[in-house]
Amino acid sequence: MTKLTKAEEQVMQYLWHIQKGFLKDILELFPEPKPHTNTVSTILKILLEKGFVDYTTHGRQHEYFAVITKEQYSGRSIKSLVKNYFEGSYKNAVSFLVEKNEISVEDLEHLLDELKNKD
């Protein structure tokens, strides 16, 4: 799966949020100052070429929808991050988060309890 640019990821976040929509629907979700319509249209074309979105045609307009789920993309992104920055070790990644106070030991213990009780 190809990595997305920041702009592509932003458009995907909006599509995941609304599930499907026309260019104008996606454009409305951008904060001010909104990008030009052509910019968002180009990003959607790139996402289409990368296989992240598809569309159905309604007259002369395209209604876009995500082909890749947010969970699929985030899972791949996390795997890539761990591989590239933590020698492929999730343990190293979690240790880093604890050291940087991004996650507390209490949260980790709570998460472990949830995982143990999941079975």
Image (cartoon, helix red, strand yellow):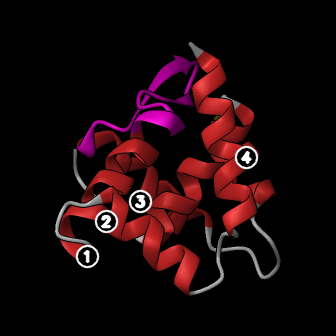
User: In this orientation, does residue 84 appear?
Assistant: yes
- Residue picked out by circle 1: 85
Provide residue 29's location: percent of width, then percent of height.
78, 56
Q: Indicate the quadrant containing the C terminus: top left, top right, bottom left or bottom right.
A: top right
Few, some or many C-alpha atoms within 10 Å of disc 2 (few <14, some 14-19, many ≥20)? some
Mark 2–mark 1 CB contact (< 8 Å): yes
Provide residue 48's location: percent of width, then percent of height.
34, 40
Mark 3–mark 2 CB contact (< 8 Å): no
Q: Indicate the quadrant containing the N terminus: top left, top right, bottom left or bottom right.
A: top left
Provide residue 71's location: percent of width, then percent of height.
50, 35
Q: What's drawn in magenta, residue-wise?
A: 50-72
Callout 2 amino acid: Leu
Of pointers 4 and 2, the one earlier in the residue sequence: 2
Q: CA distance from mark 4 to mark 3?
A: 44 Å
Provide residue 51's location: percent of width, then percent of height.
28, 36
Front position among marks 1 and 4: 4
Mark 1–mark 3 CB contact (< 8 Å): no
Q: Which residue is at a point 73% across and 35% down the rendered structure image?
A: 18
Q: CA distance from mark 2 to mark 1?
A: 6 Å
Mark 4–mark 2 CB contact (< 8 Å): no
Few, some or many C-alpha atoms within 10 Å of disc 4 (few <14, some 14-19, many ≥20)? few
- Residue picked out by circle 4: 110
- Residue picked out by circle 2: 81
Of pointers 4 and 3, the one earlier in the residue sequence: 3
Callout 4 amino acid: His
Q: Is residue 106 above or below residue 87?
A: above
Callout 1 amino acid: Tyr
Of pointers 1 and 3, the one earlier in the residue sequence: 3
Q: CA distance from mark 4 to mark 2?
A: 24 Å
